[in-house]
Image (tube, grey):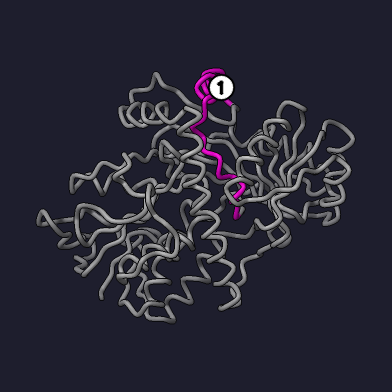
Amino acid sequence: MKVVVLGAGVVGTATAYFLAQDGHEVTVLDRQPAPGLETSFANGAQISACHAKPWAAPHMPAQAFLWMFKPDAPLLFRPWRWDPSLWSWGLKFLRNCTDARLTVNMERTLRVALYSRAVLKALRQKTNIHYDQLTQGILHIYRTAAEFAEGRHTAAQLAALGLPQDVLSPADCLQVEPALAHAAKHDLVGGLLSPEDESGDAQRFTTELAKLAAARGVRFRNTVTIKHIEDDGRRITRVVTDQGDEVADAYVLALGSYSPHLARDIGLELPIYPAKGYSISVEIENPAAAPTVSITDETNFMVFSRLGNRLRVAGTAELAGWNTGLDPRRVEPLVRNARSLFPDAAPYTDLNPWSGLRPATPDSVPILGTTRYSNLFLNTGHGTLGWTMACGSGRIIADLISGRRPEIDIDGLGLERF
């Protein structure tokens, strides 16, 4: 079967790889000159099933209101901007801010994340792919007793759904990660360790996986602008680009935050809105002072991941449309908190700042599966967990196109839930 995948980020590339593994003839279209150069380029680098708690929670509306007036807040939200897409998304988000919806959405998110983590491990064992990966877990650190109590409550919820975590004292945290010695002297009150989670360079992984996919016959058409999709009411008939049309038996929409724009051409409304995230990547000068375990700072909503001799620091979310511009006010907290947590790891001068648009759904659950068009499949809306969910999502879509039942239940993951 001939399949066209729209998007060459980590999600689209993983989809292409698994489709080729099943024997399909695959073409990938992307506007960038190589795979993995947009949202996958410099993200937080975590394979973090432990982050399955949705953004939409009962406390979030009040918290977001308080953050509206802080330019360096972890979540920047400006509801007075003329932005009907944000307002529509926001209303759906508010409907998910209940305890009942939180439980449902957490289970759905974790279901995909755990499966994807297992698929990634199997892929790594089979191919020996390298991407600066570390498999020592993710350590969540807490600075206040109230935050630590909330963290333990979430950990208990995740444990009931199949993700155990270890509760650690400050001394335990230091044993897991000695580079936290500076933080332990000040305000570290405890931690949670998700031992099976991982970290690694998503862009490097995407590049290496694209090579493996190309070796299986996948054709990557880079620097191609997708103009629109055409249909006959029942099926997609072709994809029109600035370099000619693509006609296939099946199509996969994996364009992240840009998926709604293309889907609108054929009457599909995808409740996806971009949450712009920021990162810096600095060269480590003192390896002993830099972490080797990926760290999530729950107080400052930031993550720290070791990628070879680089330290990746990422965080914040900005709901500001499809603007990818770098705001220095959003970069500064990353530098400030990195200096505070790991002051001797690097000089923090050459920052390599980056921003990317993460495709967020109102319930934090990706949109996977079929559509009313018999040959169009969706693999999008992964929010901050695109790297975490990429391999599992790609395998699910390949199974559906190949006529197999996916290895996990995909009930509640499709567009129909909206």
Quarter of the image with the C terminus in it:
top left
Can the viewer see residue 95?
yes
Residue of label 1 = 63
* Residue drawn 47% across the image and 40% down it: 105
Query: Which residue reaches farthest left?
Result: 232
Q: Residue 4: horizontal and vertical position, in percent?
A: 28, 67
Quadrant of residue 329 in the image?
A: top right
Q: Residue 24: horizontal and vertical position, in percent?
A: 32, 77
Query: Which residue reaches farthest front?
Result: 160
**SS of the residue at dot 1?**
helix
* Residue drawn 51% across the image and 29% down it: 99
**Which span is picked out in magenta?**
47-71
Residue type at tag 1: Gln
Quarter of the image with the N terminus in it:
bottom left
Q: Residue 129: horizontal and vertical position, in percent?
A: 59, 73
Can the viewer see residue 282?
no
